[in-house]
Amino acid sequence: MEIKRDRYLNQLISKRHNSLIKIITGSRKTGKSYLLFHLYKQYLLEDGVESSHIIEIALDDKKNKDKRDPDQCIDYVYDQMKDEDMYYLFIDEIQFLQEFEDVMSTFLHMKHLDVYITGSQMFLSSDIITEFIESGDEIHVYPLSFYEFFQFHDGCTWDDAYTAFCLYGGFPYVSLLEKDEDKEIYLKRLFSQTYMKNVLERNKIKDGIQLETLIDVIASSIGLLINPRRLSNTFKSIANLKISEPTIKQYLQYLEEASLVEKVMRYDIKAKRYIRTPYKYYFSDLGLRNARLNFCLKEETHIMENIIFNELRCRGYSVDVGVCELLEKKDESYTRKQTEVNFVANRDSKRYYIQAVYALHAEAIKAQEECSLFQIDDHFKKIIVVKDNVPVTRDNNGITIIGLKDFLLDQNSLDL
């Protein structure tokens, strides 16, 4: 059965012939090459493009080693173009190409050539995207969303699919494996031999103990506030490990560049400004996070938060943590108290305030979760997502309550 990536396929289709280089980014093993060389190629062929007009270069293949040379790569592409019809150039693992800036500029000047490239996330994020900010068009591929995961596991119940997704995440290859043991072995190997190795080598880190210790803390703290200065003090006092605040910040940036984690800033909703520290980190894939922790820590509330965050990012939203300040009366005086909105999701002119709640049985819990939403006096939609399978309702305060199942499986769930 084929894993569908319609969201990204449609993006490629919409960007076809736009005179820009289509740059497919994303973490390792998320299916970037499969999207381009299989799904998009299949679409072009079915749309009437002749196979001879699709030029494919996989630069990580030793057979194409000669094409890593800029002049030979350009000459090869020229030689393939036999007429004035449109040609489609697919280049995989662009980081192997020498002088890639000059080569891409040359291809941009070729009138009958539509160019698509993929490559290492760290390389693309820091180099090519910056270089081609005006002439490039980025499509960022995430691991499978739960909707894509559930589509592939046709016939699986919601509960079983959700449990598997929470534990093993959304890497396409993992979804193809049948045995849990094979999934765990693959994810552990992927983390250590691909992600960690790439971060250490690219950033010339000789001793990985500090970085690994930091990863363990982040993996154990999804959904919790992270302060680099406090982390530095904690490492020194508890683990007798000296990691300076600047080093922690730098390591966290490396992890972001590798698409292991995403940093989420706190946003003061009333003051309309960002708060510098602390901030939160969510893992781009829970399978990698769980592999690092040997599949031991399974905090359901924080995992649910991480899944909702990833879903919002897959849908193209920028996401912040919302902060609201309120005055709380105690005895005869008032004290200032900060309340949190799990996610403030923005895209174009739309904004949603979203609170994640694992269970919503007691009215006291509901009131507590709604409290932060009550402090927001603008017109944007306010949503509570609950783990329970509940019907979509809107209470007297205008707050929409939706079950996690409906939220994940209905791609228009924010507008229900």
Image (spheres, rainbow, N blue to C red):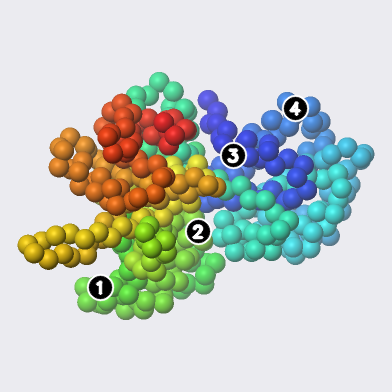
- 317 vs 196: above or below: above
Residue at image x 41%, y 75%? 247
Q: For numbered disc 2, what is the local secondary structure? A: loop
Residue at image x 57%, y 56%? 121
Mark sitting earlier along the chain (1/2):
1
Give the residue at the far front of this rendering. Answer: 332
Residue at image x 25%, y 59%? 326
| Three-letter amino acid code of the residue under disc 3 | Tyr
Residue 8: which numbered mark, if any? 3
Give the residue at the far top of this rendering. Answer: 155
Of badges 3 and 1, nearer the viewer stands 3
Q: Quadrant of the C terminus?
A: top left
Mark sitting earlier along the chain (3/1):
3
Mark sitting earlier along the chain (4/2):
4
Please name the residue that numbered disc 2 is placed on.
Answer: 258
Quick check: 72 left or right of 286? right
User: Looking at the picture, how far across and down is residue 401, in whole percent?
Assistant: 31, 35
| Three-letter amino acid code of the residue under disc 1 | Thr
